Amino acid sequence: TVESINGNQQKENHLSQNYLPKKTDLMMKNKQLDVAITGKKVIGDEEKELYGKIKGNWPNYELEFINPEGEIKIVLSYKGANIVWWADIPNLFTYFASFGRFDGKIIYKRGTKNDDIHKLVDKDEVYPIKGSGCFEHGFASKPFDYDSLWLPIRLLKNVFPSLKTIRYHYELLIGDDDLKGGFMHARGLGIDFRNRGGLFQNSNYKEIKSVEIKYLDDPKPDLVDTHCSGEPPVKFYRRWKVKARTNDGILEYIGTREWPPASIGRNMIYYNFSYEGTYKGQSISGRGYGEYVHI
């Protein structure tokens, strides 16, 4: 939200994050995508209420998300059109990002404005949501405890506490024109584990063969406290330069994160951004969604 503080307009992130037990709060069908999460009511702990629900079959999905504390609800219909596959190992791991159109609404049960701080607002405000967007879907089996794979890295970091061993950067793009796509770049101990992506333009698909990312110090990155961990603050950049190679030409852009970082984990943020650049020598611009981890 944009808030007025001492007469100045300031951008703020209000993150609603709930960690709910799977055993009691997660409902999932195994023959089709139909997932729902319930949790304790903010008022009346003995009662349950819906926090979120996703159901459907390709290319049509229905989504519902609820922030119980703020009494905010989002209801969306999604129709997918294009898919970029990140991995597809049958019965083990599948992950893709789809691009399509959303149509729905956001409901503020207590409104969005309060002219009198001594009075509660109890008037619904409903606003339409419509436009291009992305819908991701993943599946992973768990034949063993994956935490054991992280043990050598943990031991190394115990010896060298300031060592940053893993950087993961993932972005999805929705252009002002017909361009859409994204990339996944994961690097650990100086080795690229994942460096690929894909682009759609005029319904034609081009694979991204490799990505280079340069992080910029102007403007200054945000330094985020790591929640009383005793570790130094984490640096989250506001601008970065991407150069991606395809067989059809080069994609280059500068991304700008306009909002404060939403700290999903100790070293991780999800963010929205805008970008400007070129693809095959033609100017491009648009908006996107990203995930960034530096451990």
Image (cartoon, helix red, strand yellow):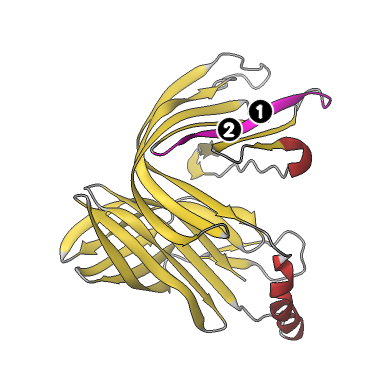
Location of residue 46 by image quarter: top right
Q: Secondary structure at mark 1?
A: strand
Q: Is residue 200 above or below residue 187?
A: above
Residue type, mark 1 in image = Leu
Which residue: 60% across, 79% down? 165
Q: Dot 1: within a 10 Å radius of its alpha carbon, few (fewer than 14), some, or many (20 or more) residues?
A: some
Q: Which span of residues is magenta-colored? A: 45-58
Which residue: 63% across, 64% down? 267
Horizontal side of residue 279 vs 61, given as left or right: left
As rendered, which of 127 and 224 lies closer to the eye?
Answer: 127
Q: Secondary structure at mark 2?
A: strand
In this view, the residue farthest toward the top is 123
As rendered, which of 252 and 36 lies closer to the eye?
Answer: 36
Can residue 175 be found in the magenta stretch? Answer: no
Is there a contact, CB below 8 Å, between mark 1 and mark 2? Answer: yes
Residue 36 rendering spot, x and y as whole percentages: 63, 34
Task: Measure the alpha-carbon separation of dots 1 and 2.
Answer: 8 Å
Q: Main secondary structure of the magenta part?
A: strand
As rendered, which of 89 and 269 lies closer to the eye?
Answer: 89
Q: Which residue is mark 1?
A: 50
